[in-house]
Image (tube, helix red, strand yellow):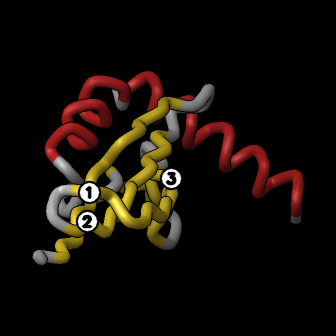
């Protein structure tokens, strides 16, 4: 009787403004039979602000599939549009 834990990226979605939403499933298995499954979601933004400058989001710790999708979706145009949208929001909020 072997109990194992498996974590898999089971859903990757791109959102309207270039964000990438990732769902991971944590599966508890006993002898190949699933006993339990839990989900976790997190969102990656095309750029992050560090002080007054924008930087590319670090995706080096993400699953290879997630990295591939981010690299395909996050064109310079998408990053610029996202940065402009966030800067406009912050200006309106002040």
- Tell me where residue 24 sits by quadrant: bottom left
State the residue at coordinates (88%, 52%): 92
Secondary structure at numbered mark 1: strand
The residue nearer to you, when weighing 9 against 21, is: 9
Q: Is residue 56 left or right of residue 37?
A: left
> Residue under circle 3?
43
Q: Position of residue 94 (x, y in %)?
A: 88, 65
Determine which quarter of the picture holds residue 17: top right
Horizontal placement of 63 versus 41: left or right?
left
Give the image location of residue 16, x and y in percent. Answer: 62, 26
Please say if the residues under marks 2 and 1 sit with CB atoms less than 8 Å apart. yes
Give the number of the disc on residue 33. Answer: 1
Instruction: Nearest to the eye among marks 2 and 3: give it.
Output: 2
> Which residue is rendered at x = 25% and y = 65% of the image?
29
Give the CA distance from mark 2 to mark 3: 27 Å
Asked if marks 2 and 3 touch (Cβ < 8 Å), the reply is no
Q: Which residue is mark 2?
A: 29
Q: Is residue 19 above or below residue 28?
A: above
Dot 2: element:
strand
């Amino acid at each position: 009787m072997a109990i194992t834990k498996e974590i898999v990226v089971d859903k990757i979605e791109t959102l309207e403004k270039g964000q990438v939403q990732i769902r991971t499933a944590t599966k508890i298995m006993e002898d190949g039979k699933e006993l339990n499954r839990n989900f976790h979601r997190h969102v990656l933004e095309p750029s992050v602000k560090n002080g007054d400058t924008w930087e590319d989001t670090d995706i080096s710790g993400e699953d290879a599939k997630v990295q591939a999708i981010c690299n395909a979706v996050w064109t310079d145009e998408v990053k610029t549009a996202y940065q402009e949208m966030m800067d406009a929001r912050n200006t309106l909020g002040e």
